[in-house]
Amino acid sequence: MTTEGSDREGPAFRRGVRLGVDVGTVRVGLAACDPDGILASPLRTLTRDKKRNYDVRVVAREAAERNAVEVFVGLPRTLSGAESASAEMARTFAGLLADRLADDGVACDVRLVDERFTTVEAHRSLRSAGLATKDHRKVVDQVAAVGILEHALSLLKRASGEAGELVPPAAERGGGIRRDDPNRSA
C-alpha cells in the first residue's frame, strides 16, 4: 500500500489527534496536533507534581477530551544514546500516563520518543523569535513539546508508520488483561 503522493511502500498515516509531552523536573510542556498531523501547536505548561501526579491527570484529561490516538513523551538521552535520571523520570511519567488512560478507559497509546536537542532547539527558536532569555522559562517546555511531537509525526509519516517505544499500562506489563480485550470491563 502506498500513501497518497508517495512512491514508498508502507502503512498509510492513521488520522487522529496526537499530543507531545516534554517532562522536566519542574515543568511539563504539552503540545497537540490536528488529526492530519500537519500542525503541532503548544497547549500549556504544567507544574510537575511527583507526589499527587496532578500533571499526569491533566495530560490524560487532554488526551480524552481531544480523542487523541497517541501521546508522545520525550525520552531524553545523552549524545551517546545512554539514558540518565531524566530518562527514568520520563519513563515513570509515561508509565503513569499509560496506567491513567487505561484506568479511564481511554484507547490512546503512550510512546516514548527520542528527544535529544529539543530543549536546545526550543531555546534557539525563542531567541530567534526575539523573546528575551528571561522569558523563555514560561514557554520553553511547550515549544520543546512541539519539537517532540513534530519529530514523532515525521517518523510516523515515513515508511515505518510507527514512532517511538510503546509504553503499555501496568496490567499489560504484568500479563494482565489488555486494553483491546473484549472481556475487559470499561
Image: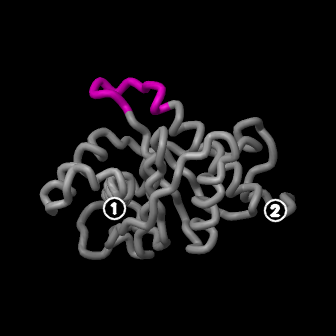
- Label ID, residue 186: none
The residue stretch that appears in magenta: 77-87
Residue under label 2, please give it.
182
Residue 152: image quadrant is bottom left
* Badge 1 amino acid: Lys
**In this orientation, which residue lies closer to the viewer: 59 or 173?**
59
Q: Residue at x 28, y 53 (%)?
A: 136
Q: Secondary structure at mark 2?
A: loop
Q: Quadrant of the C terminus?
A: bottom right
Residue 166 covered by magenta stretch: no
Residue 79 covered by magenta stretch: yes
From the top left corner, tell me how far across and down residue 79 is, in percent: 27, 28
Please tell me whether residue 164 is drawn above or below residue 1 in the rendered image: above
Q: Quadrant of the N terminus?
A: bottom left
From the top left corner, tell me how far across and down residue 60 is, in percent: 62, 60
**In this orientation, which residue lies closer to the viewer: 32 or 141?**
141
Residue under label 1, please give it.
157
From the top left corner, tell me how far across and down residue 81 is, in percent: 34, 27
Residue 33: image quadrant is bottom left
Please tell me whether residue 53 is drawn above or below residue 25 in the rendered image: below
Q: Is residue 78 left or right of residue 64?
A: left
Count of residue discs:
2
Q: Is residue 125 visible?
A: no
From the top left corner, tell me how far across and down residue 41 is, in percent: 36, 68
**In this orientation, which residue lies closer to the viewer: 99 or 140?**
140
Q: Earlier in the sequence, mark 2 or mark 1?
A: 1
Q: Residue at x 53, y 35 (%)?
A: 89
